[in-house]
Image: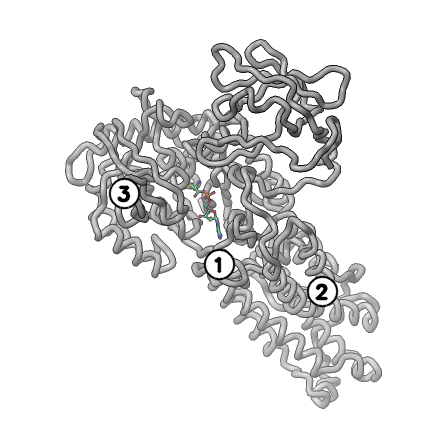
Amino acid sequence: MNTFYVTTPIYYANSLPHLGHLYTMIVADTVARAKRQRGIETYFLTGTDEHGINIERAAQKAGRTPQEQADYVVSYFTKMTSEFGLDTAHGGYDIFMRTTKPFHYEGVSELWRRISKAKTPKGNNAIYKGHYEGWFCAPCAEYKTEDEYQKPKNEGDPPTCLIHDTPLDRVSEESYFFRLSDYDEALLSVMETRPDFVRPDYRRNEVMSFVRGGLQDLSVSRLKTSVSWGVPVPGDPAHTMYVWFDALTNYITAIGFGNEERQKAVGFEKFWPALHLVGKDILRFHAVYWPAFLLAAGIELPRAIVAHGMWLDPNGRKMSKTLGNTIELDVLNKYFSNDAIRYFCLREMVFGQDGRFGYEALIDRANSDLASGWGNLSSRTLTMIARYCDSRIPSGLIPEDKLLLAKRTGVDTDETTVAGFIEHARDQFVQQFDNLAFSKALETAWSVVARIDKMITDAKPWDLAKDENQKQTLGVVLYRAAESLRWLSVMLYPVMPEASQAIWKQLGLDGSPAQVDPTQLKWGELKEGAAIAEVQPVFPRMDKAKIMSEITSGPEISTESSAPAVHATQADAVGITSFIEIDDFAKVDLRVGQVLSAERIPKADKLLLMKVDIGEEQPRQILAGIAQYYEPEKLIGRKVVIVANLKPRKLRGLESQGMVVAASYGEEGRPVIATFTEDVPNGARLK
Ligand code: ME8
């Protein structure tokens, strides 16, 4: 059966989605739509990676359980997929995979069992128990070798991660190992015999030289006492599986590996192997570890692993919340159509290489290529058909007796010229698209836009319309333009589904360009005499100055030209990037309070029990987890900030009627109580 399976990475559920995540989804969605359009049954997977120390830590910081943390982040991801038209309801993904699903546990345990029974190509056990000691980066979720970390300036300090610039953890513990070192030859042979296995070729070369440099065995479990949030190792629940082992396996568990129900619903044999789309940041995991696991388990290797580049800011810097140069999904969603964003992403980034993303560049492209380009071609063609041809598609043929007349106007009377041009462009487009050369493919499509635009400008239909004898010549010009629009709608559907559908409808066509295979397009199938629909602009022009001033004046939103507006906070640490409205803030009743008494609580070494006057009849009883950092006596008389409308809750059997506001910093989250340097009465509200 003709099937296709495409995946994005499953994103960490420890921070909120951003442009990078959106990008890989857009690419995968475009690929999936193009395959479906060609009649290929396609399965498209995206989702979240929900286990591991990072999620545990993010949850802890945010005061949630790991599952709550995952659910919280997933709700933002599904909001994003819905807003940007990437979910199932909009014809996008088939599954939003989550590694916390029970069927995934079953499948990943099955893979582990298979590999633990396997022998390597060199005859050794593929998994063995050993002892591991090394420098571990929690954000990367991997041990770092000497050339992957920054040595400390002061002796005794831990080294820091080159990627995250954070201190590494010294980890020494019993661990299961995957004997990756025995797979070097097997992996090299795959990459030699299948040159398309890792793409683009320069990434393949990088991976091959990494493998040639020698592979080290991979620690694939952590003691449950160090990492508890994960899948237990089958037969040894004192160990939790390494998060990458767990995460990579999602690609097969989602379609039925190791689980009957999924197997029936989707079908492993039906869809495997997959095309994995990933950012270059995680290529090694996909091109080395994953194929090695699959080789060990005797499972067919992926169809290919394709690595794309990273989005940088307009100045070529990596996007980061601390630099304040990230692209906010809310801003994108508010000001730009989904199609414009999709077009920009695919046109602007040469697939494989890094690209720069800026709002101004996006507006420029939307105006020049979409509003003035394809959009204008569509509205001028359709408007003229409405005006000069009574809203009916004219004939594409010039009768014999009018040929000479038509020739005199300079219009090419041989329709195969334009038909040949567009057929050739379509063939090139499809080929470039199949090679994931989206930027080139779009350039090819725009060569059609330019050619047809020129044809119209040269033929001057507005002059032809003045001469009754040139009615057929006028009709032919408009027919060719309209037929080209039909072709463009089909070709561009995977990239811009909404606009393609809109133009299709305005041409008076039934069905959807989603159902037309571009390779089967035949020139001349647009029916003469068919009524067109009401003409509406598909890509309204964007007022650059106005939009940029709105974007830049938003206090929370930073752009290429403004200084960082957001400072790193504890919220950033858990990845909170969305903003609240002033009304949301107003819901929090913050009051000035004065500490009347403070004392320790027996057997609770972190808590202090305080009485705080916030201008009410009775002082509030408040418990605060600050006993390790504050002497109770020193707090008496101090002005503090209290969250006064926090639902009371019991701690150690005592009711806490509010919360003391404190900053929190450093690894251990040291609290520093907020206070005032000027006199202020108790009970005053903070706004
Ligand atoms: O690595 N430009 O998840 P992750 C383009 N859970 N793409 C970007 C990007 C940028 N600036 N930033 C992120 C993980 N991405 C693992 C994956 S898969 C079995 C487990 C995209 O949340 C890109 O696809 O860090 C990149 O590979 C991915 O997000 C990393 O997502």
Residue 51 location, x and y as percent? 43, 31
Task: Name the element at disc 3.
Answer: loop
Q: Is mark 3 within 8 Å of ligand 1?
A: no
Q: Nearer the viewer, residue 151 or 114?
A: 151
How far is disc 2 from disc 1 in space, using C-alphas? 24 Å
Label whose residue precedes the other's in the sequence (2 or 3): 3
Q: Amino acid at mark 3?
A: Glu
Residue 466 location, x and y as percent? 84, 83
> Residue shown at 48%/63% (left/top)?
350
Number of the label disc, if any, that sits on residue 545: 2
In the picture of the structure, the residue carrying the numbered disc 3 is 155
Q: Amino acid at mark 2?
A: Ala
Say whether residue 610 is left or right of residue 57.
right
In the picture of the structure, the residue carrying the numbered disc 1 is 317
Whether residues under marks 2 and 3 lie with C-beta atoms below 8 angstroms apart, the answer is: no
Q: Amino acid at mark 1?
A: Arg
